[in-house]
Image (spheres, helix red, strand yellow):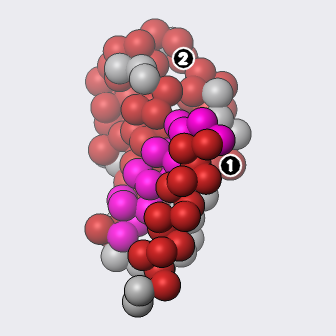
Amino acid sequence: MDISRKIGVAVKAARNSAGLSQDELAEEVGKSMKTISNIERGAVAPSIETLYQIARALKVPMADLFQDVDKRRSNKRFLAETEARELLRSLDDKSLDLAIEQIEAIARRQ
Protein backbone atom coordinates (compact mmCIF):
# COMPACT_ATOMS: atom_id res chain seq x y z
CA MET A 1 0.00 0.00 0.00
CA ASP A 2 1.51 3.34 -1.00
CA ILE A 3 1.67 6.47 1.15
CA SER A 4 -1.28 8.21 -0.54
CA ARG A 5 -3.48 5.19 0.11
CA LYS A 6 -2.40 4.94 3.76
CA ILE A 7 -3.14 8.62 4.32
CA GLY A 8 -6.48 8.13 2.58
CA VAL A 9 -7.35 5.24 4.90
CA ALA A 10 -6.48 7.42 7.90
CA VAL A 11 -8.64 10.29 6.57
CA LYS A 12 -11.58 7.95 6.00
CA ALA A 13 -11.26 6.38 9.45
CA ALA A 14 -11.09 9.80 11.12
CA ARG A 15 -14.04 11.04 9.05
CA ASN A 16 -16.13 8.00 10.00
CA SER A 17 -15.16 8.44 13.64
CA ALA A 18 -16.26 12.07 13.46
CA GLY A 19 -19.60 10.97 12.01
CA LEU A 20 -19.25 13.04 8.85
CA SER A 21 -20.12 12.07 5.31
CA GLN A 22 -17.71 12.77 2.48
CA ASP A 23 -20.02 15.58 1.39
CA GLU A 24 -20.02 17.16 4.85
CA LEU A 25 -16.23 16.98 5.10
CA ALA A 26 -15.89 18.43 1.61
CA GLU A 27 -18.07 21.37 2.61
CA GLU A 28 -16.03 21.94 5.78
CA VAL A 29 -12.73 22.11 3.89
CA GLY A 30 -13.97 23.83 0.74
CA LYS A 31 -13.29 20.90 -1.58
CA SER A 32 -15.56 18.77 -3.73
CA MET A 33 -16.91 15.45 -2.58
CA LYS A 34 -15.03 13.87 -5.50
CA THR A 35 -11.77 15.30 -4.14
CA ILE A 36 -12.43 13.82 -0.70
CA SER A 37 -13.29 10.48 -2.30
CA ASN A 38 -10.08 10.57 -4.35
CA ILE A 39 -8.03 11.36 -1.24
CA GLU A 40 -9.63 8.52 0.73
CA ARG A 41 -9.00 6.04 -2.09
CA GLY A 42 -5.40 7.19 -2.47
CA ALA A 43 -6.07 8.26 -6.05
CA VAL A 44 -4.55 11.68 -5.36
CA ALA A 45 -1.92 12.93 -2.95
CA PRO A 46 -3.41 15.87 -1.04
CA SER A 47 -1.38 18.96 -0.34
CA ILE A 48 -0.17 19.70 3.17
CA GLU A 49 -2.65 22.61 3.27
CA THR A 50 -5.54 20.29 2.39
CA LEU A 51 -4.46 17.75 5.01
CA TYR A 52 -4.26 20.54 7.56
CA GLN A 53 -7.80 21.65 6.70
CA ILE A 54 -9.06 18.07 6.88
CA ALA A 55 -7.42 17.49 10.27
CA ARG A 56 -8.95 20.70 11.64
CA ALA A 57 -12.41 19.81 10.31
CA LEU A 58 -12.15 16.33 11.85
CA LYS A 59 -10.70 17.70 15.10
CA VAL A 60 -7.69 15.38 15.02
CA PRO A 61 -4.00 16.23 15.17
CA MET A 62 -2.56 16.38 11.67
CA ALA A 63 0.07 13.86 12.75
CA ASP A 64 -2.71 11.27 13.12
CA LEU A 65 -3.14 11.28 9.36
CA PHE A 66 0.51 10.23 8.99
CA GLN A 67 0.59 7.76 11.85
CA ASP A 68 1.95 4.37 10.81
CA VAL A 69 2.58 5.49 7.20
CA ASP A 70 6.14 4.18 7.17
CA LYS A 71 5.60 0.98 9.13
CA ARG A 72 5.81 -2.19 7.07
CA ARG A 73 2.92 -4.57 7.45
CA SER A 74 0.19 -6.12 5.35
CA ASN A 75 -2.58 -3.98 3.93
CA LYS A 76 -5.14 -5.99 5.90
CA ARG A 77 -3.30 -5.36 9.17
CA PHE A 78 -2.84 -1.65 8.41
CA LEU A 79 -6.57 -1.25 7.70
CA ALA A 80 -7.56 -3.21 10.81
CA GLU A 81 -5.21 -1.25 13.10
CA THR A 82 -6.43 2.06 11.69
CA GLU A 83 -10.06 1.07 12.22
CA ALA A 84 -9.34 -0.19 15.75
CA ARG A 85 -7.56 3.05 16.69
CA GLU A 86 -10.53 5.14 15.52
CA LEU A 87 -13.01 2.91 17.33
CA LEU A 88 -11.01 3.17 20.56
CA ARG A 89 -10.92 6.97 20.26
CA SER A 90 -14.70 7.08 20.09
CA LEU A 91 -15.18 5.28 23.43
CA ASP A 92 -15.82 6.91 26.78
CA ASP A 93 -13.27 6.18 29.53
CA LYS A 94 -15.22 3.30 31.09
CA SER A 95 -15.76 1.58 27.76
CA LEU A 96 -12.12 2.16 26.81
CA ASP A 97 -10.97 0.45 30.02
CA LEU A 98 -13.21 -2.53 29.21
CA ALA A 99 -11.92 -2.70 25.62
CA ILE A 100 -8.30 -2.64 26.81
CA GLU A 101 -9.01 -5.46 29.28
CA GLN A 102 -10.51 -7.54 26.48
CA ILE A 103 -7.62 -6.86 24.11
CA GLU A 104 -5.11 -7.76 26.83
CA ALA A 105 -6.95 -11.04 27.49
CA ILE A 106 -6.83 -11.91 23.79
CA ALA A 107 -3.14 -11.00 23.57
CA ARG A 108 -2.32 -13.25 26.55
CA ARG A 109 -3.88 -16.24 24.77
CA GLN A 110 -1.36 -16.07 21.94
Please name the residue that numbered disc 1 is placed on. 63
Tell whether position 33 is magenta.
no
As shown in the figure, which amino acid type bears the numbered disc 1? Ala
At mark 1, the secondary structure is helix
Please name the residue that numbered disc 2 is placed on. 29
Tell whether position 87 is magenta.
yes
Callout 2 environment at 10 Å: few (<14), some (14 to 19), or many (20+)? some
At mark 2, the secondary structure is helix
As shown in the figure, which amino acid type bears the numbered disc 2? Val
Q: Does residue 4 sit above or below 28 in this rendering?
A: below
Q: Residue at horizontal 48%, vertical 67%? A: 103
From this viewpoint, is residue 7 visible?
no
Which segment did they paint magenta?
Answer: 77-93
Q: Main secondary structure of the magenta part?
A: helix
Q: In the figure, residue 51 lies in which quadrant?
A: top right
**Would residue 15 be found to the left or right of residue 53 on screen?**
left
From this viewpoint, is residue 87 visible?
yes
Q: Nearer the viewer, residue 22 or 84?
A: 84
Q: Residue at horizontal 46%, vertical 10%? A: 27
Callout 1 environment at 10 Å: few (<14), some (14 to 19), or many (20+)? few
Q: Nearer the viewer, residue 39 or 83?
A: 83
Q: Residue at horizontal 42%, vertical 20%? A: 20
